[in-house]
Amino acid sequence: MTELTKSDQGPDAVTAQPAGGTAEPAPAHITQWAEIRHRFAANRLAVVGLVLVVLLFAVAALAPLIAPHDPYAQDLGNSLQDPSGDHWFGTDALGRDQFSRVLYGSRIAVVVGLASIFLACLIGCVLGALAGYFGKFVDSVIMRIADIFFAFPLLIGAIVIIIVTGRGVMPVIVSLAVFSWATVARLLRSSILSVREMDYVTAAKALGASTTRILLRHIVPNSIAAVMSYVAFSVGTAVVAEASLSYLGVGVSPEVPEWGNMIFAAKDFMGIKDFLWVYPSVAIVLTTLGFVFVGDGLRDALDPKLR
């Protein structure tokens, strides 16, 4: 027994097809996260950036194992040596191995970059969520406080805090976070202003859900996309800011193997021993580009309309 179906020869033509024919299986359901991964993987620069970031983390974690020399060991009889088989990036004015110091410098970059942005996101997400959800007086107070921090340039504000608290990794982390949270708060607030009017939020309120549950379960997870891409961009910014503070003499201690310290120590040898500043500078550029490319890829993957 057969049933009649239209053929592609015309709207009135019919063909025979077995009545018991098996229908084609429905396409597999593609989750939202699978689509995000696909869009991210399709962005070549984002993939390159991810490779650079993964390489940075690997170098930072394995620095004690792969560094050929102690980054603090001084050898005045072997100072300012050009790159060679024993010292791949040469030695500085105190005879310290530049390659080992660049490797160890990645650890400071990772710690400061991630910790400062994590702290900034923690502060910004809490205040931004409160401002966006409650609005009115709470929103006005939080946004006016944010405006005060927006008025201070990042480096100037960080220098003021470090001068008061003293040099070190922790003061650098805190100072960068204090002058970075306002952007996170404003981004999250803007997203929440639209999300809080959605039907599922109204339903949660009608069912008697607490404010904390509504914020953590329904509003923040659906408003966090803009913050995620900003975080990736900001880690690169924090790495540059941290190196700048060290170069200006208000970052980590001068003897610490850190890229800004290395460039500062090389300033008297520019044009003579350029390898002293080139390698740490390249490390800063590659690290920053890696996080910028990842942030750009996340932005396009999370919201393709922004392309």
Image: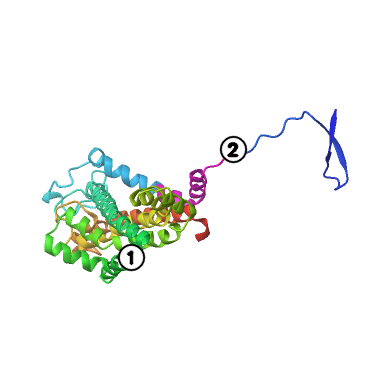
**Picture quarter with the N terminus:** top right
Q: Is residue 44 above or below residue 152?
A: above
* Residue 223: percent from left, percent from top: 42, 55
* Residue 99: percent from left, percent from top: 25, 48
According to the picture, the residue beneath numbered tag 1 turns out to be 139
Q: Report the residue at 30% width, 44% height from top.
A: 59
Q: Which residue type does callout 2 highlight?
A: Ala
* Residue 6: percent from left, percent from top: 83, 42
Tell me the number on the disc at residue 108.
none
Q: Nearer the viewer, residue 246 or 18?
A: 18
According to the picture, the residue beneath numbered tag 2 turns out to be 28
Q: Secondary structure at mark 1?
A: helix
Residues rendered magenta in the picture: 28-50
Q: Nearer the viewer, residue 87 or 296?
A: 296
Q: Report the residue at 26% width, 61% height from top.
A: 241
Q: Secondary structure at mark 2?
A: loop
| In magenta segment, residue 47 | yes
User: In the displayed structure, does residue 288 sit left or right of residue 248?
Assistant: right
